Amino acid sequence: MSAELLLSVLNDRHVELGAKFAEFGGWSMPLEYAGAGVVAEHTAVRTGVGIFDVSHLGKATVAGPGAAEFVNRCLTNDLTKITPGKAQYTLICNEDGGVVDDLIAYLKSDDEVFLIPNAANTAAVVDRLAAAAPDSITITNQHSDFAVLAVQGPRSDETLTAAGLPVGHDYMSFELADFGGIPITVCRTGYTGERGYELVCPREVAGALWDKLIGAGQPYGIQPAGLGARDTLRTEMAYPLHGQDISPEISPVQARLGWAVGWGKDAFFGAEALKAEKSAGPTRTLRGLKAVGRGIPRPHMTVLNTDGETVGEVTSGTFSPTLKTGIALALVDPSLKINNTVRIDIRGRATDFVITKPPFVHPGVKDS
């Protein structure tokens, strides 16, 4: 592993837990932990509670008079649909409608928006916004200033309560909390499909917060979880991964993310191209595929119709620990519909899959 990879502020704790590391977005991050593994970590999140270090995620602040209005003219979703104290999933696109990144926007006030983009794309997001910003608006890259911990699973509320942190607020809303005299943000968000929270804290208290949460979660079987489980969890929910399911070459229309586009807005990056594509209809569309028999799909595998003709390509594929079968997301010919049978070329063997409406498992993310 390259010595140039960035390390989380919690790296020493991951080493102590016997983590196996992998490169992701320029960072060395835990893939799985000794004594557990991906399936056990995945299951802990689905049935109890897991904790992830996702400090590799980007952080940026847009501030100044009318900052929220400015962000709304740039990002796809309609920020006017939420109020301060709420968060929103949104996208930043290029002129051709491709996705530069997907991110979460925390609306703090009319004059301040906090953004969490993906690790490798933070600079591109900041630079693109800065190039469009008037002099009254400042965009600050705070990637190294904060850590992000995700507590996910049906026992996440009990874990946070035991740690003395606020719980019970609405999905996609956030509250400020005091942790040892330091303000942290507790947002009811996550990328697992389970009820849970993401905690944004100054990096100097990240270790103490991790330790507090691990201790608080012990009665509920808390399990540190790595990027391996994060990937299987998000794939079961059909949550897109940038660089695979969405990219500068894959638009929100193709990825079936039109719900995250404010089509009635006057302006946002890529608006003209996206509206034209929506009107004409995409030439490919993202679908969920579930294995009929055995076989684990992987990205870039070819999707065939029952006549053996190429009709698409897998973008994300894995073994579902919940369903005990192979699942995939794939960009395919839009003429293919739910319940149609297709085949994936898995190492030279055509394996049957059924086109399935995602998510593959029932989400608990909005459970009250």
Image: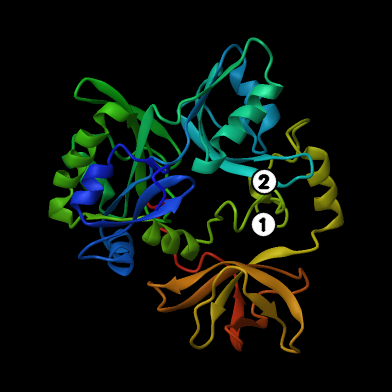
Q: Nearer the viewer, residue 102 or 49?
A: 102
Residue at 38% from the left image edge and 48% from the top image edge: 28
Q: Nearer the viewer, residue 227 or 339?
A: 227
Q: Nearer the viewer, residue 298 or 85?
A: 298
Q: Nearer the viewer, residue 51 or 168?
A: 51
Residue at 40% from the left image edge and 57% from the top image edge: 230
Q: What is the tally of numbered marks visible in this picture?
A: 2
Q: Does residue 91 appear in this view?
A: yes
Residue identifier under label 2: 99
Residue at 61% from the left image edge and 58% from the top image edge: 245
Query: Please, what is the three-letter code of the amino acid marked with disc 1?
Result: Ala
In space, the residues marked 1 and 2 are separated at their CA atoms by: 10 Å
Compared across the picture, whether 11 is left or right of 195 comes to: left
Q: Is residue 364 above or below residue 7?
A: below
Q: Secondary structure at mark 2?
A: strand
Image quadrant where residue 227 sits? bottom left
Residue identifier under label 1: 255
